[in-house]
């Protein structure tokens, strides 16, 4: 049998730079309540959301991704041509094919690097970080650009009471690279397809096209079932992630859970018994739920505000449709 040589990579991977893009238009709860017979008070009390950002016509998935990536590349001190792979996590790129990652890489100038999209909904960014980290350690890439981006307003019905006030738009990006010390801990990830229907596109495209008056099949969610799953199960995943990285809550500086609901964030922090001094991402109040973009957006805000500092240890945990989840401990660049 012919023996093949195999690639070997860096001993460890780390995040070198983070960037994000927030659409210009701020949408307060008051703009949405009439269509869903709700109130600013109800939305704030049940979700913690005060306002969110909706993308305008020029703020496409590609445009937001490129803007977030340029900031991340700049902070990392890496040129686009040094990127060996572009991974885009999204559920709102509206062409079935080709992957938007290829167009983003081309616009950035990643010099024909491999580029592909992944679909893991709100857990997509943490899936991308896990893949990128393993590629760097496995030798198939030296620098990887991971983007989480959504224009959820394209697939959200503003008259759907269960989702209209939740979903929003934006992009976040991270440049990953080789390191002598671990800067990205082992991922803990999984899925529960038995709960496939809890958050989903309402209909299959083929069923939409045979309707007399076809409408965009928007997102629907069984909110309270997802809420219970996230509040109870994700705290266990968070603890398992700390265990796999060989650390405890006492070693954490920053906690960045998926920005789905302020009450879920608080419930997780309570279950994990997070020490008071751990800074917790609460971007949801001003950004809503941006699915794959929520974690890098929240992290970037904390870096900009000085709440997350270089060298800090942060736990990222993302969960959503699938139901899919992924979590890892990272060092803030
Ligand atoms: O990103 C992916 C992961 N997603 C999540 O993690 C989302 C998790 N779920 C949630 O965040 C919450 O379930 C929601 C914020 C979506 C809803 O909050 P809830 O506390 O679970 O509300 P509920 O659906 O249990 O409804 C409570 C009450 C009901 O009235 P009754 O039956 O108690 O009289 C609803 O009819 O609130 C009513 N309601 C509303 N009222 C005003 C439901 N939606 C609305 C609304 N405005 N938009």
Image (cartoon, grey):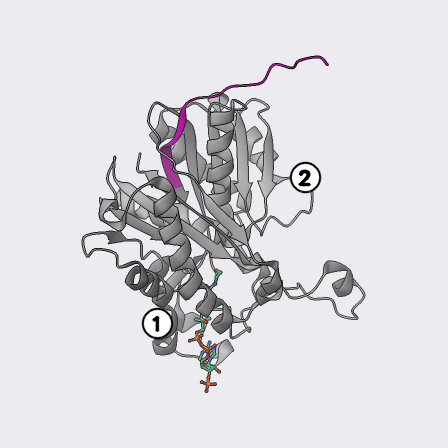
Answer with mark 2 or mark 1, whichever residue precedes in sequence: 1
Residue at x 58% of width, y 18% of height: 6
Answer above or below: position of 243 versus 83.
below
Answer above or below: position of 163 versus 58.
below
Taking the view exactly as shown, the residue that stands out farthest to the left is 277
Which element carries disc 2, helix, strand or loop?
Answer: loop
Residue 296 located left or right of residue 204: left
Residue 246 located left or right of residue 204: left
Q: Is residue 6 magenta?
A: yes
Which element carries disc 1, helix, strand or loop?
Answer: helix
Callout 2: CB less than 8 Å from ligand 1: no
Q: Is residue 281 among the parts visible in the rendering?
A: yes
**Residue tagged by mark 2?**
98
Q: How many numbered markers are drawn?
A: 2
Query: Quadrant of the image for the N terminus?
Result: top right
Q: Is residue 114 magenta?
A: no
Give residue 230's position: percent from left, percent from top. 44, 63
Taking the view exactly as shown, the residue that stands out farthest to the front is 1
Give residue 316's position: percent from left, percent from top. 38, 47
Answer above or below: position of 259 versus 197.
above
Magenta stretch, residue numbers: 1-19
Residue at x 34% of width, y 31% of height: 75
**Residue tagged by mark 1?**
44
Residue at x 45% of width, y 68% of height: 227
Q: Is residue 56 among the parts visible in the rendering?
A: no
Give residue 222's position: percent from left, percent from top. 54, 71
Query: Quadrant of the image for the C terminus?
Result: top left
Taking the view exactly as shown, the residue that stands out farthest to the bottom is 37
- How far apart, in angstroms, are the residues tagged by discs 2 and 1? 39 Å
Q: Nearer the viewer, residue 7 or 284?
A: 7
Residue at x 41% of width, y 51% of height: 317
Badge 2 density bin: few <14, some 14–19, many ≥20, Cα 10 Å:
few
């Amino acid at each position: 049998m012919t023996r093949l040589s195999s690639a070997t990579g860096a001993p460890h991977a780390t995040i070198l730079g983070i960037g994000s893009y927030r659409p210009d238009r701020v949408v307060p709860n008051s703009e949405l309540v009439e269509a869903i017979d709700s109130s600013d008070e109800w939305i704030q009390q049940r979700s913690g959301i005060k306002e969110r950002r909706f993308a305008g016509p020029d703020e496409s998935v590609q445009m937001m991704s490129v803007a977030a990536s340029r900031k991340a590349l700049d902070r990392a001190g890496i040129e686009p041509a040094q990127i060996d792979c572009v991974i885009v996590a999204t559920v709102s790129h509206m062409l079935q094919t080709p992957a938007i990652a290829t167009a983003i890489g081309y616009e950035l100038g990643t010099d024909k690097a491999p580029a592909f999209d992944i679909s893991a909904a709100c857990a997509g960014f943490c899936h991308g970080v896990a893949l990128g980290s393993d590629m760097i350690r496995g030798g198939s890439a030296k620098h990887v650009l991971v983007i989480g981006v959504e224009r959820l307003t394209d697939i959200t019905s503003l008259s759907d009471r269960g989702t209209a006030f939740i979903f929003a738009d934006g992009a976040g990006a991270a440049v990953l690279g080789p390191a002598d010390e671990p800067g990205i801990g082992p991922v803990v990830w999984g899925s529960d397809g038995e709960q496939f229907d809890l958050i989903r596109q309402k209909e299959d495209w083929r069923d939409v096209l045979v309707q007399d008056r076809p409408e965009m099949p928007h997102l629907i969610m069984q909110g309270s079932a997802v809420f219970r799953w996230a509040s109870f199960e994700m705290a266990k995943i968070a603890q398992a992630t700390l265990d796999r990285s060989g650390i405890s809550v006492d070693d954490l500086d920053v906690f960045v859970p998926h920005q789905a609901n302020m009450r879920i964030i608080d419930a997780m922090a309570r279950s994990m018994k997070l020490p008071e001094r751990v800074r917790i991402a609460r971007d949801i109040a001003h950004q809503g739920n941006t699915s794959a973009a929520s974690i890098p957006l929240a992290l970037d805000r904390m870096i900009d505000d000085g709440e997350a500092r270089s060298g800090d240890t942060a736990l990222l945990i993302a969960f959503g449709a699938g139901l899919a989840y992924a979590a890892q401990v990272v060092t803030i660049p």
